[in-house]
Image (cartoon, rainbow, N blue to C red):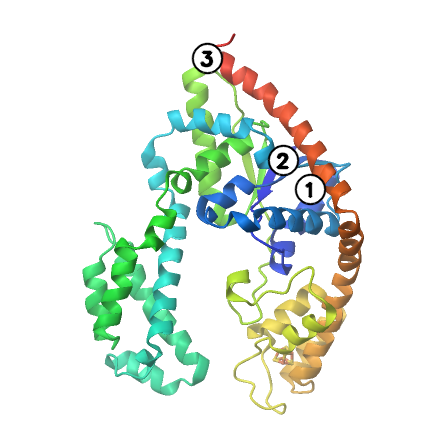
């Protein structure tokens, strides 16, 4: 199979990236022709103000990819922006892609939702933490009364998310007015609500992603895939609408200008979802990730901070590994037999959480050790490893040019 897949260079990679993407790529590289690229143009779609860190992020990605074992002998590893044909094909696709296909794209809406929601939440909690102590409507009041410490934040988060969800996915656009009324009812200071919503409606937060580039990034993604006539794309479930859009663009192009592109299939990656140490999605922005480059001491500290079964207060309480973050890590880093043993002992209160965490930290460190030493080797001679990507970009460019010649010809574009 010919496979294309890319990753945005947004910083050092963490264990979530490894188990969500890289592990799968390592499998795919064994029996397929793979084009793996660093999607630096995609990184600009919502991080266009942060170009200072782009070069460093690309270098980090090169180091991470090679240190986990992506093999340049088996794959074409390249940098998207060094293969200009991606931009040309994307431009031509944008001519034939109806705007509504992009506006209706669920992941575009979801990304916008998440950005808006995160802003609103940070603003409210940061500006007016007292919101949690003011008397909100009865049901929330009761819920908060039961809760302590961080749980309060969680409950507030759930309520706020639900409210914002209803306002955001309103038929007639975001219902800011309704949201304002409900937030005030929740006990949030009126002035703070007004300021937050005004920033959302008219401030930079909306504008950051209100760009042509952001809206049309699925078109660039279609070009990334179709330019190599890939038959297969490995994706997570949330990416499925993009692949469907890629197929629709290929179909439309073929109908207009004659059969040029295959319609790629997707393979769902067997994603082992690894949560961050606080139980939320693992992400740099939540400061809850364990990085591939993390040193052993820091791994230990982070594992000791991990959330466990919240009902297990004392060592003598029986635990439930099914709801424990530490245990979900054990399933990935610990031998099967030992996992069964921990499961058993936890349920009978025969092992304490600190001991359990120490075992996990040792196992994560064992897993990371070879990656760390590969990283050190690569860093010593980074220029020659960057050359691998330079070579890969040349090869990718030759392949992309073959497709572009066909595209230009089929579209009957001018040629000197
Ligand atoms: S013993 Fe281990 S699996 Fe059980 S609750 Fe504690 S950390 Fe989690």
Query: As displayed, is residue 304 above or below residue 74?
Result: below
Mark 3 CB within 8 Å of ligand 1: no
Residue beneath the point at 41% across and 42% down: 214
Residue beneath the point at 59% across and 65% down: 289
Q: CA distance from mark 2 to mark 3?
A: 29 Å
Q: Where is mark 2, residue-wise?
A: 3
Front-most of 177 and 55?
A: 55
SS at mark 1 in the image = helix
Residue 232, can we see it? no
List x then y, in percent, for residue 116: 35, 57
Q: Nearer the viewer, mark 3 or mark 1?
A: 3
Q: Where is mark 1, residue-wise?
A: 28
List x then y, in percent, for residue 398: 65, 23
Is the residue marked by circle 3 packed among few (<14), some (14-19), or many (20+) residues within 10 Å? few
Q: Where is mark 3, residue-wise?
A: 413
Q: CA distance from mark 1 to mark 2?
A: 8 Å
Q: Quadrant of residue 166?
A: bottom left
């Amino acid at each position: 199979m010919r496979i294309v897949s890319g990753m945005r260079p947004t910083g050092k990679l963490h264990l979530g990236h490894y188990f969500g993407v890289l592990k799968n790529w390592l499998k795919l590289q064994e029996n397929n022709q793979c084009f793996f690229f660093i999607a630096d143009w995609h990184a600009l779609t919502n991080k266009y103000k942060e170009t200072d860190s782009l070069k460093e992020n690309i270098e980090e990605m090169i180091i991470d990819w090679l240190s986990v074992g992506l093999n340049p002998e088996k794959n074409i590893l390249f940098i998207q922006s060094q293969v200009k044909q991606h931009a040309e094909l994307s431009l031509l696709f944008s001519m034939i892609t109806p705007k509504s296909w992009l506006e209706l794209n669920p992941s575009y809406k979801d990304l916008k939702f998440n950005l808006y929601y995160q802003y609103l939440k940070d603003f409210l909690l940061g500006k007016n933490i007292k919101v949690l102590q003011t008397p909100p409507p009865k049901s929330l009041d009761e819920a908060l009364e039961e809760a302590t410490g961080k749980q309060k934040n969680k409950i507030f988060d759930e309520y706020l998310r639900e409210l914002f969800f209803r306002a955001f996915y309103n038929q007639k656009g975001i219902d800011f007015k309704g949201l304002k009324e409900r937030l005030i009812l929740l006990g949030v200071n009126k002035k703070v609500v007004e300021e937050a919503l005004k920033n959302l409606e008219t401030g930079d937060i909306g504008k950051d992603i209100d760009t042509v580039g952001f809206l049309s990034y699925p078109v660039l993604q279609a070009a990334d895939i179709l330019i190599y006539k890939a038959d297969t794309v490995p994706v997570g479930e949330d990416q499925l609408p993009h692949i469907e859009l890629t197929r629709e663009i290929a179909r439309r192009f073929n109908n207009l200008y004659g059969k040029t592109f295959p319609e790629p299939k997707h393979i769902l990656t067997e994603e082992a979802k690894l949560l961050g140490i606080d139980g939320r999605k693992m992400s740099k922005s939540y400061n809850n990730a364990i990085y591939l480059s993390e040193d052993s001491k820091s791994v230990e500290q982070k594992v000791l901070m991990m959330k466990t079964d919240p009902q297990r207060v004392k060592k003598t309480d029986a635990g439930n590994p099914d709801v424990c973050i530490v245990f979900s890590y054990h399933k990935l880093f610990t031998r099967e037999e030992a996992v069964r043993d921990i499961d058993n002992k936890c349920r009978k209160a025969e092992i304490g959480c600190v001991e359990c965490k120490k075992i996990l930290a040792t196992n994560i460190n064992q897993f990371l050790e070879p990656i760390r030493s590969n990283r050190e080797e690569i860093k010593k001679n980074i220029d020659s490893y960057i050359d691998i990507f330079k070579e890969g970009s040349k090869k990718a460019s030759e392949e992309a040019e073959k497709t572009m010649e066909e595209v230009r010809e089929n579209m009957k574009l001018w040629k000197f």
